[in-house]
Image (cartoon, grey):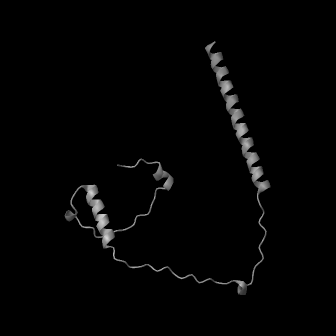
């Protein structure tokens, strides 16, 4: 009696999973066919003569050397406030910009410290 119910349950499970995998395979085949049907075919572009190509000269951007004493003072004040020690106890010797690794949407979702 119990074994009959167990066998029936396993049969229903196998048939249900078989139907699901069959439908998923059919969807996969249909998507592959649509990819081949609707894919744009690239036409070969005519080769242009080298004399028609113009090279545009772009000047290199120049970096201004400026006095960063005010920037260093602001950064030093921020560090002193953060670590709660007077600015005379440490010295800022080098400032390097760190690349932003977290996307903007990730930073927007974080709570701000107050």
| Nearest the eye: 54 or 8 | 54
Q: What residue do we see at 72% from left, 33% from top?
A: 19
Q: What residue do we see at 72% from left, 42% from top?
A: 25
Tell me if residue 7 comes above or below residue 55 in the rendering. above
Q: Is residue 9 left or right of residue 58?
A: right
| Nearest the eye: 16 or 73 | 73
The quadrant holding residue 26 is top right
From the top left corner, tell me how far across and down residue 11 is, in percent.
68, 25
* Outermost residue, bottom side: 51
Tell me if residue 40 comes above or below residue 22 in the rendering. below
| Nearest the eye: 81 or 45 | 81
Tell me if residue 12 comes above or below residue 27 in the rendering. above
Q: Point out the image quarter for the N terminus.
A: top right
Q: What residue do we see at 46% from left, 58% from top?
A: 101
* Count of numbered tags: 0
Tell me if residue 107 comes above or below residue 2 in the rendering. below
From the top left corner, tell me how far across and down residue 88 is, in percent.
20, 65
| Nearest the eye: 48 or 24 | 48
From the top left corner, tell me how far across and down residue 6 is, in percent.
63, 19
Q: Is residue 98 left or right of residue 41?
A: left
Q: What residue do we see at 22% from left, 58% from top?
A: 85
């Amino acid at each position: 009696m119990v074994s009959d119910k167990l066998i029936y349950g396993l049969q229903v499970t196998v048939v249900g999973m078989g139907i699901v995998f069959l439908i998923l395979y059919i969807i996969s085949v249909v998507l592959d066919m649509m990819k081949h049907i609707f894919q744009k075919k690239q036409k070969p572009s005519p080769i242009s003569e080298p004399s028609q190509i113009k090279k545009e000269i772009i000047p290199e951007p120049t970096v201004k050397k400026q006095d960063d004493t005010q920037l260093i003072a602001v950064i030093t004040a921020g560090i002193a406030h953060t670590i709660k020690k007077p600015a005379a106890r440490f010295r800022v010797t080098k400032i390097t910009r760190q690349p932003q690794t977290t996307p903007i949407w990730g930073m927007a979702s974080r709570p701000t410290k107050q």
